[in-house]
Image: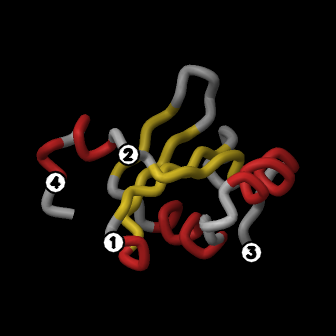
Amino acid sequence: MLKTTRYFEENVLAKRPEIQREWCSRVLKDPITSIEQLDGRWRFWGAIPERENRILRVVTLSDRETVHNAFFDRKFLRQNPHLSQL
């Protein structure tokens, strides 16, 4: 079961109803890449085939499990041209 913050439940899913929990789980299990933010949270990126391989960024708390935010990251491939084959 996907662990989430109250912010994710009340704000993110309300503002971005196209984002599916299952996609967040997939990205966390098999990310293209991930990095730790300065505040201790983690960013994970993954391609979503159901959305023409658009890149979903999933932000977790420091435990790397609890989803706090998620959105389609339009800049990811421009900033990572070596991954443009996705």
| Image vertical order of residue 3 relative to residue 81, above or below | below
Q: Which mark is residue 84?
A: 4
Q: Which residue is mark 2?
A: 74
Q: Give the CA separation, mark 3 to mark 4.
A: 31 Å
Kind of residue indicated by mark 1: Glu
Please identify the residue farthest to the top as the structure is shown: 38
The picture places residue 46, in percent across and down from the top left corner, at: 40, 60
Q: What residue would you read off at disc 1? A: 52
Dividing the picture into quadrants, the one containing residue 74 is top left
Residue under pointer 3: 1
Q: Which is more foreground, mark 3 or mark 2?
A: 2
Q: Are marks 3 and 2 in contact (CB under 8 Å)?
A: no
In primary-sequence order, the first of circles 3 and 4 is: 3
Say which label, 3 or 2, has the lower sequence index. 3
Which amino acid type is marked by label 3? Met
Q: Is residue 2 left or right of residue 50?
A: right
